[in-house]
Image (cartoon, rainbow, N blue to C red):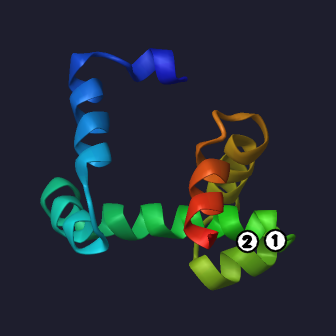
Amino acid sequence: MIDKVKDANTDKLAEAIVSVRSVDEAYRFLSDLCTISEITEMSKRLTAAKMLRDGSTYNEIAEKTHLSTATITRVNRALRYGSDGYAMVLDRISE
C-alpha cells in the first residue's frame, strides 16, 4: 500500500508530520491540512484500533465511535495485515 502512494508529494507530507513537535503544533497543522470531519474521522479510527487491540467487539466500537462496521473492518484489517502503523503509534502514545 505504501508504494502505491509514495511519491515526492507524499514524502513531503510525511516529513511535515515528522516535523511536528507538540500536541499544539499537531492541532495547528491538522486544522490547516484537514477539515474538521476528516480530523474527527481519523481520531475515531485510532480509537477503534485501540479498542480492537483491547478486545472490544465491533458493536461496542460502533456504539462508541459511530463508525460503520465496514470502517471498523478496514481498521481491523490494517491492524492485522497492514504496515503496523497503528500498533507503532498506539504503543508510543500509551507509554
Above or below, 34 relative to 63: above
The image quadrant where one finds the C terminus is bottom right
Q: Amino acid at mark 1?
A: Asp
Residue 43 placement (x, y as % from top left): 46, 68
Above or below, 12 relative to 24: above
The residue that appears at 24% across and 70% down in the rendered structure is 27
Residue 55 placement (x, y as % from top left): 87, 70
Q: In this rendered view, identify the residue nearer to me: 72 or 47.
A: 47
Above or below, 90 relative to 55: above
The residue that appears at 18% across and 66% down in the rendered structure is 31
Q: Is residue 86 left or right of residue 53?
A: left
Residue 18 placement (x, y as % from top left): 32, 45
Disc 1 to disc 2, C-alpha distance: 5 Å
Cβ atoms at labels 1 and 2 below 8 Å apart: yes
Q: Is residue 94 left or right of residue 19?
A: right
The residue that appears at 25% across and 55% down in the rendered structure is 20
The residue that appears at 62% across and 55% down in the rendered structure is 71
Can you name the residue that lies furthest to the left here?
32
Q: Which quadrant of the structure image shows residue 32?
A: bottom left
Q: Is residue 42 left or right of residue 73?
A: left
Q: Which quadrant of the structure image shows residue 78?
A: top right
Q: Answer few, some or many: residues within 10 Å of disc 2's Cα (few below 14, many 20 plus, some between 14 and 19).
A: some
Residue 85 placement (x, y as % from top left): 59, 44
Q: Answer few, some or many: residues within 10 Å of disc 1's Cα (few below 14, many 20 plus, some between 14 and 19).
A: few
In this rendering, the count of numbered labels is 2
Q: In this rendered view, identify the residue nearer to me: 33 or 59.
A: 33
According to the image, label 2 marks what residue? 51
The image quadrant where one finds the N terminus is top right
According to the image, label 1 marks what residue? 54
Q: Amino acid at mark 2?
A: Met
